Image (tube, grey):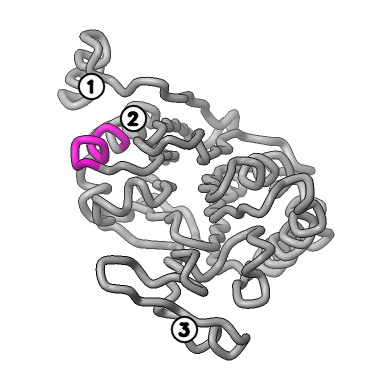
């Protein structure tokens, strides 16, 4: 156990850990590669219920082992991210060409799932959710997709590399306006689609859907001997930490669960007020 891990354990014992947190860990069962994961979620200071949901598990799929990891960050309610947690990966793996064309399969499944959410708007409500998902195939290949501002960052040779794209309204203004929408930019506020939503892509949000995309950014990344770990996190972390700060702060923490917890604690120390959710996947 490293010195940083010992310090984290001591903080936990004396009650300096986060309250009302959800946490967990797991590992790959493959014999030729030791992959572990850990996650930690902390509710923000807002007066609404927790709107972040996490998936972190390994699953046998045909002759492969898949690591399924995701963070769903809801807005205007928790029903949409909860639905995504239960259905998105199933929809991806049902795509007949997932094994041969995972990028196109993931894109279709995202769009299909968004359609189902819109059909169920009466049941799921008017809210929506961002998403970042990562599928690890046999410990060798990562398929990362996202809509919104939850982010995926990999540490490779000690350097931070962002795999996802932050879908900010200001960056997609032309597309939004071409659909008849607008991007507000009021002093003291962030740019918003139709003056409401601070991301340009998301699941759900039926009232904004004419101007809002659910098409994901997808990237396929090879996991090699220099790939150290992957971080998935909601914007509760990224609002207060850069990619490099996040990577550097946990690079010497070998336990993935402790690493995820450390990042949430650091975000709280830096006064993040949003829900904070982190998944760390470690490639030993």
Badge 3 vs badge 2, beta-carbon distance below 8 Å? no
* Residue assigned mark 1: 8
Q: Earlier in the sequence, mark 2 or mark 1?
A: 1
73 in relation to 23, above or below: below
Residue at image location 79% in from the left, 63% down from the top: 97
Crowd around label 3: few <14 · some 14–19 · many ≥20 (10 Å): some
From the top left corner, tell me how far across and down residue 48 is, in percent.
48, 37
Q: Is residue 67 in sight in this rendering? A: no
161 in relation to 88, above or below: below
* Residue assigned mark 3: 173
Kindly state the secondary structure of the residue where label 3 is placed. Answer: helix
As drawn, the label of residue 261 is: 2
Q: Earlier in the sequence, mark 3 or mark 2?
A: 3
From the top left corner, tell me how far across and down residue 174 is, in percent.
49, 89
Badge 2 vs badge 1, beta-carbon distance below 8 Å? yes
Residue at image location 15% in from the left, 23% down from the top: 3
Instruction: Point out the stretch of residues depicted in magenta.
Output: 264-271
Q: Point out the frontmost of discs 3 and 2.
A: 3
Residue at image location 52% in from the left, 40% down from the top: 51
Q: Earlier in the sequence, mark 1 or mark 3?
A: 1
């Amino acid at each position: 156990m490293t010195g940083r891990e010992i310090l984290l354990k001591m903080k936990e014992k004396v009650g300096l850990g986060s309250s009302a947190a959800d946490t967990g860990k797991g590992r790959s069962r493959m014999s030729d590669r030791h992959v572990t994961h850990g996650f930690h979620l902390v509710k923000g200071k807002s007066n609404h219920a927790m709107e972040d949901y996490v998936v972190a598990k390994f699953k046998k799929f045909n002759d492969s082992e898949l690591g399924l990891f995701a963070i769903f960050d809801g807005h205007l309610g928790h029903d949409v991210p909860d639905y995504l947690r239960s259905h998105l990966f199933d929809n991806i793996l049902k795509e007949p060409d997932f094994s041969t064309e995972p990028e196109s399969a993931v894109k279709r499944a995202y769009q299909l799932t968004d359609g189902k959410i819109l059909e169920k708007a009466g049941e799921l409500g008017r809210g929506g959710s961002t998403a970042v998902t990562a599928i690890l195939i046999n410990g060798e290949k990562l398929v990362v997709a996202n809509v919104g501002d939850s982010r995926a960052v990999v540490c490779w040779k000690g350097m931070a590399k962002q795999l996802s794209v932050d879908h900010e309204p200001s960056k997609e203004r032309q597309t939004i306006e071409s659909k008849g929408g607008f991007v507000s930019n009021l002093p003291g506020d962030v740019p918003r689609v139709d003056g409401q939503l601070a991301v340009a892509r998301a699941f759900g949000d039926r009232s904004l859907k004419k101007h809002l995309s659910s098409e994901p950014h997808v990237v396929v990344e090879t996991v090699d001997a220099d790939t150290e770990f992957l971080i998935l996190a909601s914007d509760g972390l990224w609002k207060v930490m850069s990619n490099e700060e996040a990577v550097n702060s946990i690079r010497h923490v070998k336990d993935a669960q402790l690493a995820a917890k450390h990042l949430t604690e650091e975000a709280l120390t830096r006064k993040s007020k949003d829900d904070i959710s982190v998944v760390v996947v470690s490639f030993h």
